[in-house]
Image (cartoon, rainbow, N blue to C red):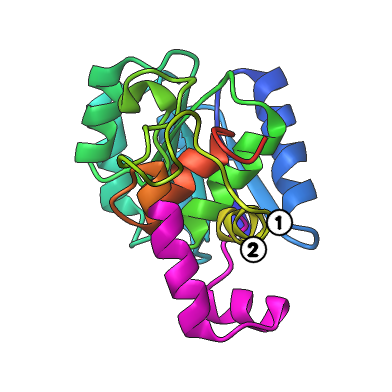
Amino acid sequence: MHVLIADDHPLYLSAVREQVERLFPGGTTEVAATLGDALTILNGPRGFDLLLIDYSMPGMNGQSGVQTIVARSRGMPVVVMSGVALASEVSACIGAGARGFLPKTLDSKVFSSALNVILAGGSYLPAEMFGTPCQPPPPPSGETGGGDVEFAEREKTIMAMVVEGKSNKEIARLLNLREVTVKVQLTRIYRKLGAKNRAQAATLMAQGHVLG
């Protein structure tokens, strides 16, 4: 795992670097403090598995900087980090091709879960993009008999594995289940969450709505 972290705040950059190296033991990181520095590194011969880019570091100029990074990323997932998660900025970044937007207020557990979701092929958006940030979508009428959404222990286990980026096949093997059983369980989980797909469900799970 090779990760580029670009941020002009030394303390935050150091914290993110430590978190990434803890999440991916044996991986390597490179750092930059400006858009120009990041582009210079990207022009090198070695590719990256993940790009973590500060939205407001020198040279970015908002959405245009994100577009520049995405254009030079050669298909590598680009994730934007920002101290403020304005809905308009989040939408602009995703529209520019970013795979995720991470508020700098995220705790380490959610930050790590979000990266796993993105590396598994999903996307991560801050809770503000889903409306009320602290409440999961209500279940369809009759799904849980009304009231709060409830999940069986097996469902919680599967959900945690999804957040970790595991595939249905891996989940089935680890839990000694048939893969079709995992698919049925996930369909039920998506319905309870009100999620349309795996990526949206994983985002809600990673934000701690249901995993606790």
- Residue 90: image tag: none
Image location of residue 21, percent across then percent down:
76, 48
Q: Residue at x 56, y 21 (%)?
A: 104
Label 1 Cα neighbours within 10 Å, binned few <14 / some 14-19 / many ≥20? some
Whether residue 180 is situated above or below residue 159 in the rendered picture: below
Task: List the residue tagged with mark 1.
Answer: 28
User: Is 24 left or right of 148, judged from the image as shown?
Assistant: right
Image location of residue 153, percent across then percent down:
69, 54
Q: Nearer the viewer, mark 2 or mark 1?
A: 2
Residue 112 in the magenta stretch? The answer is no
Cα–Cα span, label 2 and label 1: 6 Å
What segment carries the magenta color? 164-190
Task: List the residue tagged with mark 2.
Answer: 1
**Secondary structure category for the residue under label 1:** strand
Image location of residue 106, percent across then percent down:
60, 25
Q: Is residue 43 visible?
A: no
Rendered-image quadrant of the C terminus: top right
Q: Identify the image quadrant of residue 28.
A: bottom right
Q: Identify the image quadrant of residue 7.
A: top right
**Secondary structure category for the residue under label 2:** loop
Image location of residue 124, percent across then percent down:
42, 41
Q: Identify the image quadrant of residue 109.
A: top right
Residue kind at label 2, given as amino acid type: Met
